[in-house]
Amino acid sequence: MRPIERGGGVPEPLAPSDLGRARSGLAVVREVEPVGPGCVELVLDCAGVARAARPGEFCQLRVAEGPVPLLRRPFSVCRTDPAAGTVTVHVGVVGAGTRRLAAAQLGDRIGVLGPLGRGFTVPSGPGTLLMVAGGLGAAPFPLLAAAGHARGAKLVWLNGAATAARLYPVERLGAPVEAHVATEDGSRGRRGRVTDLLPALLGECDRIAACGPNPMLAAVARTVAARAPGLPLEVSLEAPMGCGIGTCLGCALPVVGAPALALLCRAGPVLPAVAVDWGRLGTLPPAHAA
Amino acid sequence: MRPIERGGGVPEPLAPSDLGRARSGLAVVREVEPVGPGCVELVLDCAGVARAARPGEFCQLRVAEGPVPLLRRPFSVCRTDPAAGTVTVHVGVVGAGTRRLAAAQLGDRIGVLGPLGRGFTVPSGPGTLLMVAGGLGAAPFPLLAAAGHARGAKLVWLNGAATAARLYPVERLGAPVEAHVATEDGSRGRRGRVTDLLPALLGECDRIAACGPNPMLAAVARTVAARAPGLPLEVSLEAPMGCGIGTCLGCALPVVGAPALALLCRAGPVLPAVAVDWGRLGTLPPAHAA
Amino acid sequence: MVTPAPAGRAGPTLSVAIGRGLVLPNPIGVASGTFGYGFELGALCPVERLGAIFTKGTTLRPRPGNPPPRVAETTAGMLNAIGLQNPGVEVVRERYAPSWRSWPVPVIVNVAGADLEEYARVAGRLDGVPGIGGIELNISCPNVAGGLDFGLDPAQAASCVARVRAATTLPLIVKLSPGAADIAEVARAVADAGADAVSAINTVVGMKVSLALRRPVLAGSGTGGLSGPAIKPVALAAVARVRAAVAIPVIGIGGIADAADALEFFVAGADAVQVGTQTFVEPDAALRVLDGCRAYAGEAGLARLTDLRWSPGGPASGRGPGGG
Amino acid sequence: MVTPAPAGRAGPTLSVAIGRGLVLPNPIGVASGTFGYGFELGALCPVERLGAIFTKGTTLRPRPGNPPPRVAETTAGMLNAIGLQNPGVEVVRERYAPSWRSWPVPVIVNVAGADLEEYARVAGRLDGVPGIGGIELNISCPNVAGGLDFGLDPAQAASCVARVRAATTLPLIVKLSPGAADIAEVARAVADAGADAVSAINTVVGMKVSLALRRPVLAGSGTGGLSGPAIKPVALAAVARVRAAVAIPVIGIGGIADAADALEFFVAGADAVQVGTQTFVEPDAALRVLDGCRAYAGEAGLARLTDLRWSPGGPASGRGPGGG
Ligand SMILES: Cc1cc2nc3c(=O)[nH]c(=O)nc-3n(C[C@H](O)[C@H](O)[C@H](O)COP(=O)(O)OP(=O)(O)OC[C@H]3O[C@@H](n4cnc5c(N)ncnc54)[C@H](O)[C@@H]3O)c2cc1C
Ligand SMILES: Cc1cc2nc3c(=O)[nH]c(=O)nc-3n(C[C@H](O)[C@H](O)[C@H](O)COP(=O)(O)OP(=O)(O)OC[C@H]3O[C@@H](n4cnc5c(N)ncnc54)[C@H](O)[C@@H]3O)c2cc1C
Ligand SMILES: Cc1cc2nc3c(=O)[nH]c(=O)nc-3n(C[C@H](O)[C@H](O)[C@H](O)COP(=O)(O)O)c2cc1C
Ligand SMILES: Cc1cc2nc3c(=O)[nH]c(=O)nc-3n(C[C@H](O)[C@H](O)[C@H](O)COP(=O)(O)O)c2cc1C
Ligand code: FES
Ligand code: FES
């Protein structure tokens, strides 16, 4: 397990940091692809991120030119085309900022800062990677699937959503996967949640990567801890991010051990599930509540 | 001369008020017509204002749905088509609010509150009305010209601008006029300002209506006071307007006599020049300064 | 503080008892200085449906107000330095109050003064005048006479309130200033001195600068009162802190633009709210807020809007952190 | 306060003398809590061109900070309740300061404490440490120990400053809180107590409420510090009032997003400025502000940015109106 920054307060500023690859600039919108209700994927001209981004890393996108909404929003790098110099982000509309992004027009310029954070461990060779996505959590998986596929990993895809229309189109993963789906209304696949399908898949896989709302990740972590305690599980978590680069100290998240808070934008957004203090995370008010 | 509201502080709230005709609603943009550099005319579906507006009155337009820019902006009613239920406003870009309005697209909805204020005296019959417009001050004249023409008045048009491209196209006045123009760079008409041409026209006219930046109006008032003291001159003035309906008390403007301040949105925006305290107006910081 | 919902009646109870017999038919009022004396808006915002009208700040004698420019827009807000232009208390008594008698909405006269004496005299002149529902004491008005800003100091605020309390039997709402070092302390002081309710907040001192002119935009000292959405977080914090400090009704004010904003104030601890600057943007803003709150309460099955109130745990009743 | 322009050299003089030998190469710094300890941003904002770096608030011992959520966005602003998460003064002395020695930009350590003793001890530990350009005293930090907010009261602010002044020979900038009833009075008190300069403003206390959760968004008491464009008018008013009250340099802070904003602070009376929240939006915001100010000064033919300063007439030196 790689070390987590949880130094005595701020992340250790003198330690080598991933920020060396991050750049800030304006990216032109090249394509706008609707992907299900309230979701679009934006293809952005952004050669720096396209070249440097690793699976599970994120970018901070500006959502307005003026002061409302003020702060950038974090989005996982969904897909990259280093040759074309483009990056795809998957935007699910939840509030004012994502509404503006989803309404972007071809040719618009969007401020992009990235790549940021630390992502998923990419499988180092054959073996099975189980990717678990709930809600809007599919975003980081096309890039992870491509990297895993390139290294010869077998990919299993487990996607849960409220209803069929909100499942992530499996062909958009861009790599061959064995797909399992669950919907809460039973409109496709198994009726229920990803955690209902998960137990049956645990035996077949060598590591798990999960992304979705924090409570879903907690459920996945509980399932894995109970049924396959040694299995490496990495989760991509959410926290409100003021800066994305470790200076605002806003994205602190409870981790096990003292001093018990890590900055998600530097230590994460992907953390080993065993490092997260799920108990304290669960007692906190949700990071976002409109 | 009609009485001016300058009661002991607030405008007399129990006095009969023009606000009875004012309505607030959303108007659909029907046409967007560029008129010279940085100017557009917006034709809005707004039957209430189209029916009720009198020359020199204004509307308060919302310039954003959100809180930035927050306040409505005042615009003279430029032209009306009561049969079609449309109102035209002339928008000159000076800052963030007018920039947004000028970028309106067909079909957009714009909040319109109006008609508001008190306008120009419409000629009651034949006789000559001299209309003096400087800078962006042409806006109220198409409606005044139509009303004057309908009553058989002879119309003389005196328009000044920095350069030819910024003159108001005389054909847009929509009524036959005798036109005189002055440009500061001499690119059309007389080189100089409207006040250079004004003296020669004073002998021919029975009343004057003027609109433009307050300093220009002051110059017009000085010229008239010096050369044709009895000639009725009405000026459409500018002040920052928080509300446009007499409640914020923000648009106070110095007038002669005690207590010396009138609310421009209720007593004006058109005032008899003799009522304005030009001396005190001149010493105040400009209403608008970015 | 709120009349209990009559058994068997559908929909939330909206009326709010302020004290001394003053009951607002609903908790959405219009703020002082943004609705004149209730006559101006007419058909643009029918007063019959409002919960309360708080008039323009009224002084003993008529005041012409400050020289222009008096208002300026800022990011998500506006500044004003009107300087308490008003027709004086006699005009209010004799010309406006008689019309208010027939209105179903309580009209509460916002009272200002340069010294204790003036506050007391204005309050006294309003006492017993039919049509006047109560007094909102603006203890934090501009320093019109180079005098004190009573709203900034608990002791001075209390002495002002005590003086006014002695001069009138009208319901007395004291309007608090966000400029006080500890607004909760001022609230406690005025409650102890006899206020029936408090309202918060008044505007925040601010300035806009014109780079072109190399001077402030507003005349005089260049400062004015900041209002609008920009100050909503400041107002919510003030309401929460005042709520924890006093038992009397709290009327929330500051940056309310829609029903969601108003509902946030009920969560923070308000019993009623006032809509100010937004009325300049939408003349019927307060009625939209009312309709939205009513609809929300209906959908959420609330008996009253104060059921939204958040009850902080132990640490929250103290002075909260200011950041860092 | 500003080094005179050397004769015959083109372009404005940008350096600013703060006192006790501290000279900022240019007047555009980055604000405490928004730039870490200067190491984080790296290539995103090369520190060499900055006028000053004000570090995160530093306490005697490491502090883990508050539980999340710690930040929340508001209209044209943000709230933070970080709770002074920092590695403690020893790490700053021993690990960070040595790196700062070779930087061309002065690094000024923002100091916080729960009581006078802690302030003095932190200041003492920083004294004489090479690489540390000065101290910015955060006398208005969150009440981390249920203690006093020294920044709200002139006498307490002065006693804190006097205590720190005795503990260090470093240049001392005192950061003022907008929460004081009269910020000018606090400024005068700290200047008399030995401050070399003042900076203003720290964040404004605010709250965001989640209607869905029916509670504040931030953890704990729910309040936090408001920053960003929403508070710019509050900051400009504070700077103008402090400028009129003291003769020492004034560093303006609050809502600066571009060069025009910064230039407005020079009109209001600032000698230098700090860029805070905007760095979260644009990592190199401070450098853009610097470039824009330099270009403006060049075009306007200014010898120095303080030539923009507005000098109010008589009435403006008093406490200005707050609206109404
Ligand atoms: C590391 C990371 C990666 C993410 N990747 C994606 C992605 O690829 N695709 C996608 O659709 N969404 C992603 N999200 C969630 C996305 O950032 C939020 O949905 C978005 O910020 C909401 O902004 P809004 O203005 O629409 O919502 P609002 O409700 O208006 O936001 C208000 C505030 O809350 C914050 N906020 C709101 N929702 C969240 C959330 N879920 N997590 C953290 N802060 C939040 C916003 O940043 C903003 O500051 C990611 C979040 C994180 C932390
Ligand atoms: C009665 C009246 C009628 C008007 N009619 C027209 C018209 O028909 N066509 C037209 O193009 N313009 C007209 N104007 C001027 C127009 O209202 C301003 O140009 C506009 O408000 C500028 O807004 P902005 O956001 O672009 O500028 P900004 O500089 O961003 O405005 C900032 C603030 O200053 C105020 N302000 C700016 N300029 C003026 C001004 N000249 N007078 C008063 N307040 C100002 C704004 O309302 C706003 O509150 C009229 C003004 C008045 C008072
Ligand atoms: C133009 C204007 C004039 C005001 N006049 C007064 C006043 O006379 N007395 C008073 O107590 N408050 C006055 N206020 C303050 C408002 O009543 C209210 O407290 C403040 O504007 C905050 O609310 P808002 O953000 O909804 O506007 C005034 C506000 C504005 C904008
Ligand atoms: C996330 C965050 C953390 C802050 N931490 C500190 C701090 O530790 N010490 C301090 O004096 N000010 C702190 N501040 C206040 C800023 O230095 C600055 O005074 C304030 O944000 C206003 O400036 P702005 O509007 O440009 O951000 C912090 C501000 C923010 C946004
Ligand atoms: S988002 Fe600012 S420190 Fe992590
Ligand atoms: S614009 Fe508000 S009173 Fe005239």
Image (tube, coloured by chain):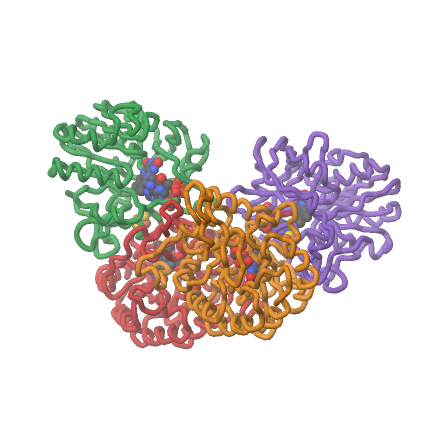
Chain colours: A purple, B green, C red, D orange
Residue C125 in view here: yes
Specify the quadrant of the image occupied by residue D313.
Answer: bottom left
Specify the quadrant of the image occupied by residue A135.
Answer: top right
Residue B187 at x, y percent in the picture: 31, 24
Residue C49 at x, y percent in the picture: 38, 54
Nearest the camera: B23 or A238?
A: A238
Specify the quadrant of the image occupied by residue D59.
Answer: bottom right
- In the shown orientation, is residue B126 left or right of residue C225? left
Nearest the camera: C257 or D143?
A: D143
- In the shown orientation, is residue C150 left or right of residue B103? left
Number of numbered discs on residues: 0
Residue D257 at x, y percent in the picture: 51, 48
Where, quadrant-wise, is the C terminus of chain C in this rendering?
Answer: bottom right
Nearest the camera: C9 or D104?
A: D104
Residue C313 in view here: no
Q: Residue furthest front?
A: D7
- In the shown orientation, is residue D93 left or right of residue B209? right
